Image (cartoon, rainbow, N blue to C red):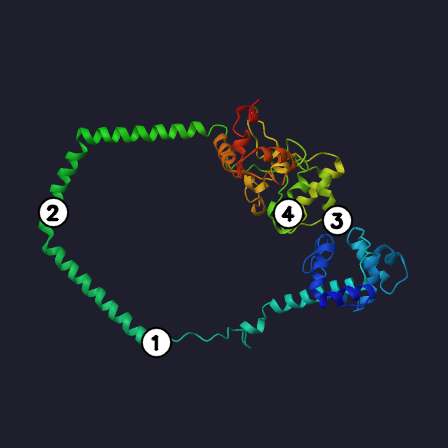
Amino acid sequence: MKSFMRRLGLLLGIGFLSAQDGKALFQANCASCHAVNRRVVGPALKGVHERWGGDEAEIIKFVHNSQAYINGNFKYSSYAKKLYEEYNRAVMTAFTALSEAEVKAILDYIKAETEALAAAAPSPSASTGASGASSTPAPEVSPILWVLVIALGAIAIALLVATLALSRLLRPEAASVRAVGFERLRALLASRRFIALLILVGFIWLTNATIKKARSVGLHQGYKPVQPIAFSHKTHAGEYKIACQYCHVGVEKGKSATFPSTNICMNCHNYIQEGSRYGTKEIAKILASWEEGKPIEWVRVHNLPDFVYFNHAQHVKVGGIACQTCHGPVEEMEEVYQYSDLSMGWCINCHRQTKVDLTANPYYARLHQQLKEKEVTVERIGGLECSKCHY
C-alpha cells in the first residue's frame, strides 16, 4: 500500500516520498559532486536550508536549472551567482527529470543526516563539569584489595628469604655440579659428531639461502618508488570509491593498464584545488603539468620481464579477475607498492586454483557444452602451456 501511494504521489505531484527515498535519490544524482558533511566538487550540503533562508521552493528551482536561476532574477540569484564564482564556475547539471517531490525527499534526507551528525557529536558539557574538570567520580579502592596486596607482599618477602637461605646451604654442591656440567659440555663441543652435525646444518642453511636468493632474481615484491606527485590511492580508491578503470583506462581494452594522463586528473581537479591530505602543494603539480602541456612522469611499480606476456584485458574483461587479486588492497594503500611477488610459481598456482565461469561468458559457451566437468580451472583450458605466457 505504501509503495502504491508513493507511485500515486509521483503521478499527482504529491510529496509522499520519505527521507529514505531521498537517500537513494541523493546517491544516484548528487553523491558524485556533493557530500553532506564535506566539500567534494561542490559545497557540503549540511545547512543548505539555512543558507537558502529555509525556502525549499527556491532550492527546487535552482536544482531544476542552476544556470537559468543564476542568470535570472530570482529571490536568491545573487547568492547562487556568488556560489558559482566561488566554485570555479563549475556548472551544475540541470535535473529537470526530478519532480518537486523527489527534490524535497533529497532535502529531507540532507536535513535528517545533518541532525544525525549533530546528535552524534560529543557534547563538551557531558564530559566536564561547571569548572571544566572531569565530572566522572574517582573509583573507590576496596579495603579487601589492600589486604590482598599486603598479604601477597608478605608472601613474596618470605619466599625471597627462603631462597637466599637455600642458596647458601647448596652453594658448594652447586659449584661442583656446574664444573662437571662444563666438562661434559666441552667434551661434546669438541667431538667429531657434533662438528660434523654443525657442518651439515651450515651446508643445508647455505644451500637453502642460495636457492631463495636465486629465485628472487628479477622479483620486486614490496617495491615502492617515490612518485613525482604524492598520490593517495587510499583517498581516491578507498574514501571516494573511484573505480580503478576510471584512471587506468587500458585495463579492459589491451595488454597494459596504462598510466593516467593529466587530462583525466583534470576532470576532477579543474574544480578541486585543495586536497584533504596534502593541501594545494601536490595538486599544483597537476595544474602545472596541464598548463605546460608536459606529461606527469609516473614511475612504473609493476614490471614483468620482457620475455613474459601478460594481457590485462584477458584477465580483467574476459576472466573477470578483480584488480586486488594481483595488486592487493590498493584502496587501503597511501602509496602503492608491489603486493605480490608476481613470480612464475605464483602465476601457475593461480591458474591451477582459479575456476572459470563457463556460463557467464559467451566466449566459453561452446566449450561448456563439450566439457563434462562442472568446474574447470584455468589449467584445464591451456593455462599452463608455455607459449601462453612466453614468446
As drawn, the label of residue 194 is none
Q: Disc 2 marks which residue?
A: 175
Q: Would you say 73 lies left or right of 158 here? A: right
Query: Is residue 76 found left or right of 344 in the rendered image?
Result: right
The residue indicated by pointer 1 is 142
State the residue in front, 330 or 235: 330
Position of the C terminus, as image quadrant, is: top right
**Within-10-Å neighbours for mark 2: few <14, some 14–19, many 20+:** few
**Mark 4: which amino acid?**
His
Categorize mark 3 by other alpha carbons within 10 Å: few (<14), some (14-19), many (20+): some
Total numbered labels placed on residues in the image: 4
Element under label 1? Answer: loop
User: Cβ–Cβ below 8 Å for labels 2 and 1?
Assistant: no
- Amino acid on which disc 3 is placed: Tyr
Residue 271 image label: 3
Residue 71 vs 101, above or below: the answer is above
Q: Earlier in the sequence, mark 4 or mark 1?
A: 1
Helix, strand or loop for disc 3: loop
- Of the two numbered discs 4 and 1 in the rendering, the one whose residue sits closer to the viewer: 4
- Is 355 rendered above or below residue 389? below
- In this rendering, position of residue 338 left or right of residue 70: left
**Looking at the rendering, which quadrant does residue 57 occupy?**
bottom right
CB within 8 Å, label 3 to label 4: no
Sequence-first tag of 4 and 2:
2
Name the residue located 12 percent from the left edge and 49 percent from the top edge: 174
